[in-house]
Image (spheres, rainbow, N blue to C red):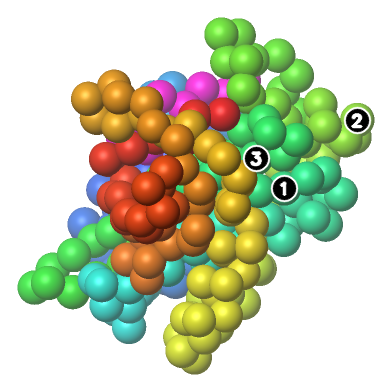
Amino acid sequence: MNVIKLNAIASTNSYLRKICAKKVLEDFTVVVTKHQTNGRGQMGTVWEAEHGKNLTCSVFKRNDDVSIDDQFYISIVTSLAIIKTLQRFQTPKLFVKWPNDILSERKKICGILIENVIKNNKIEGSIIGIGLNINQTAFKHLPQASSILNLTGRWFDPEEALASIVKHMEYYFLQLQNGKHASLKRAYEALLFRKNKPSTFIDVNDNLFMGYIQGIRTNGNLKILMEDNIIKEFELKEIQLLY
């Protein structure tokens, strides 16, 4: 693991993407910073974290053996690796809020942003951004956010968390490389927040509807059992699961 440590940077994903465009990177090259001034989340959201208290990093992974149709497995692998680390830290009641927010006790403690480098309709590599709340205790205007410290009462070293996450990423990416798609998908689905429970969703037109999460398709689309007993599938930008 090649680690590039920075005191402050606008975005670790953007920084890693610039490096990736200039030279061939070693697998699992990591950019980590104590302070990210313009962190990005899913669908244009902003990720905020206090200086030095959390893990803000991006990991480069060559994924030329992953087809575009299977690219959601990169998210699955990353989510499982983070969950394994959090279990090691004895973080309670862990779930994945589709597609890749990590929750503990219904509170968001980790976000993932994956940007694939695609050329000639093939994935050459992935830039995997991870924002994990570790030792921050206050989250202004973010009532659904929390941290490992808040949830366990224990302080943890962000560098230890990073080493554990990358170790587990290596394991799960090897599983993916070895064709263990079905078992990886089952493990992810078992962790889905509100699976098989009546849940409220909002669509792009701000319409609310009820449904039961059944699982995911291999492309990452969410399968929902609707009130008329028909299972429909939705893409990431089509709906949002409300807490």
Q: Quadrant of the C terminus?
A: top right
Q: Name the foreground residue: 102 vs 169.
A: 102
What amino acid is found at the position of numbered circle 2 in the picture? Answer: Gly
Range drawn in magenta: 41-51
Q: Position of residue 65 (x, y in %)?
A: 32, 83
Residue at 28%, 50% in the rendered image: 235
For label 1, the residue is 94
Q: Position of residue 40 (x, y in %)?
A: 38, 32
Q: Mark number for residue 153?
A: 2
Residue at 72%, 61% in the rendered image: 84
Q: Tell me which numbered mark, 1 or 2, is placed earlier along the sequence.
A: 1
For label 3, the residue is 103
Query: Is residue 64 shown above or below 231?
Result: below
Please tell me how crowded label 3 is: few (under 14), some (14-19), or many (20+) other residues with Cα within 10 Å: many
In the rendered image, the residue lying farthest to the front is 228
The answer to if 134 sits in the magenta stretch is no
Residue at 8%, 73% in the rendered image: 120
Residue at 67%, 30% in the rendered image: 107
Q: Is residue 112 visible?
A: no
In the rendered image, the residue lying farthest to the top is 141
Q: Which one is closest to the eye, mark 1 or mark 2?
A: 1
Q: Secondary structure at mark 3?
A: strand
The answer to if 45 sits in the magenta stretch is yes
What amino acid is found at the position of numbered circle 3 in the picture? Answer: Leu
Q: Position of residue 238 (x, y in %)?
A: 27, 40
